Amino acid sequence: MTRRRFFVPLGKIREGVAWLSFDQIHHLRDVLRLRPGDQVEIFDGEGNGYLGRVEAAGSELVVGSLQKIEAATESPVHVVLALALAKPDRFAWALQKTTELGVQEIVPLRARFSPVRLTEDKLQASMERWRRIVQEASKQCGRVSIPRIHQARQVLDFLTGKEFPNSARLFFDEKSPECWGSTFGRSARFVVCIGPEGGWDQAEVEAADRAGYQIRNLGPRILRTETAAVAALAILQFQGGGLGTSQRGERA
């Protein structure tokens, strides 16, 4: 039987006890029918996992007797995914699947040809939804960390920024004459830019080139934004050992 997992922020874990939210208590007690003494797993989203047992604390339930466990689910490959905004269901799917594939950071990009335009109010509401999606995806796939979702950025502003130093930089453009090859040696840090379904504006491509990005295509077929994101993450994880065994046959 799969062990039940709960996300509890680090600030809610004190002296070997994880304090659950009201909704979590309801889910644990009334939906899952767990009782004091049952074993569950806790993760704090910061890279720590724990085993503990359900305990009564007055009228509430907590998870106590926490013991830290070693988690082998985090990837040795640190990927920052800069992903052009797409239609809500497709963007959400990309967030979920790239979280399962081990992405560490996500930057939503406002590209010229993105098919959606979000007001600030709608963007903030979307951010909350996106954070819930990656949290649930981390919980489901056994991760102990939760990808960080940055504030949305204009493409040109992002490309000229100084964030994420010492990273190999990839900019995928279906019009590039060069197909992506494994040319990164032993790099374990990447910034990966995936464009909108309408493609990149030429000014965006030129800015990426000036910023030192390797501009490549992902093969002869035109991929949707969410497909390209998953394909790029899967290849990077395979090459770097994030899927369990590296391409060189070494254990990650």
Image (cartoon, grey):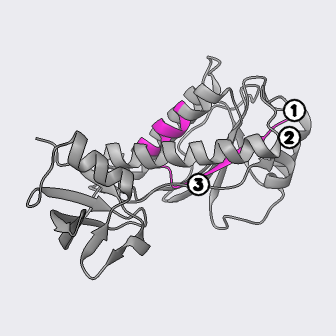
Q: Are marks 1 and 3 in contact (CB under 8 Å)?
A: no
- From the image, tell me which residue sits under label 3: 190
* Residues at marks 3 and 2, CA–CA distance in whole angstroms: 19 Å
Q: Identify the magenta region.
A: 93-111
Report the amino acid beneath label 2. Glu
Q: Is residue 207 magenta?
A: no
Question: Most extreme residue toward the front, as rendered?
Answer: 59
Question: Most extreme residue toward the right, as rendered?
Answer: 203
Does 169 sit left or right of 135 as displayed? right
The residue sitting at 18% across, 56% down in the picture is 40
**Residue 216's x, y, as percent?**
68, 36
| Circle 1: element type | loop
Of mark 1 and mark 3, the one earlier in the sequence is 3
- From the image, tell me which residue sits under label 1: 201
- From the image, tell me which residue sits under label 2: 204
Could you tell me if residue 218 is visible in this image? no
Using the image, tell me which numbered label, if any, was put on residue 163. Answer: none
**Residue 198's x, y, as percent?**
78, 23
The residue sitting at 82% across, 40% down in the picture is 119
* Residue 35 quadrant: bottom left
> How would you rate the neighbour count of disc 3 (Cα within 10 Å): few for under 14, some for 14-19, many for 20 or more?
many
Q: Are marks 1 and 2 in contact (CB under 8 Å)?
A: yes
Does 20 sit left or right of 180 as displayed? left
* Residues at marks 1 and 2, CA–CA distance in whole angstroms: 5 Å
The residue sitting at 82% across, 33% down in the picture is 117
Does 235 sit left or right of 68 as displayed? right
* Residues at marks 1 and 3, CA–CA distance in whole angstroms: 23 Å
